[in-house]
Amino acid sequence: MARLPITGGDNDSWGTVLNDYLQQALASDGTLLTTPTNSYTGSTNTNLANSTRPGLVQLTGDLSVPVTAPKVVGLQGFAVASTTPTDGQVLTWSASSSNWQPSTASAGSGVLRAQAMAIASMRI
């Protein structure tokens, strides 16, 4: 496993240890490696999000790409409908569509309805 040189240790081998560390993610010209296998070490590149795209994070599950602006596409593994909600709507489960959808809150107990409306009106 590649590591940084240790202060007070690695006598006469700092260059070798540091080069091994840097070659895990950088090509000989200093650019980020974009191939699944490191040409220096023959091992799998640790800097790849997957075998074709470089990166430190791979978005999976309820998050989607791009990494620079991830989008929540599900809750607990269940899809969120792409329907744009209107003012005052809440997120509810639709068994017939098997996804979360915006809907108008139904009349219920005053406290629970007030809490749902407060949550629905929150701006992040």
Image (cartoon, rainbow, N blue to C red):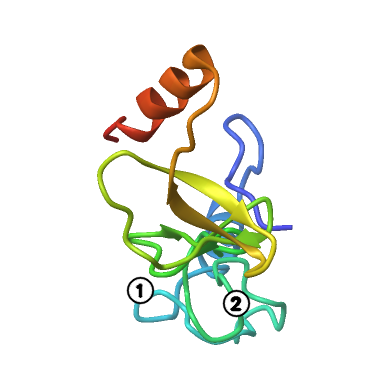
Q: Determine which residue is flagged by label 2.
A: 50
Visible residue check, residue 61: no
Q: Determine which residue is flagged by label 1.
A: 30
The residue shown at (62%, 66%) is: 46
Front-most of 61 and 32? Answer: 61
Q: Residues within 10 Å of mark 1 (few under 14, many from 20)?
A: few
Q: Is residue 63 left or right of residue 69?
A: right
State how far apart marks 2 and 1 are (Cα): 20 Å
Q: Residues within 10 Å of mark 2 (few under 14, many from 20)?
A: some
The image quarter containing residue 39 is bottom right
Front-most of 45 and 87? Answer: 87
The image quarter containing residue 44 is bottom right
Front-most of 81 and 32? Answer: 81
Q: Residue furthest top?
A: 111
Q: Is residue 74 above or below residue 116?
A: below
Q: Is residue 87 left or right of residue 39?
A: left
Q: Is residue 38 left or right of residue 56?
A: right
Amino acid type at image mark 1: Gly
Q: Is residue 84 above or below residue 43?
A: above
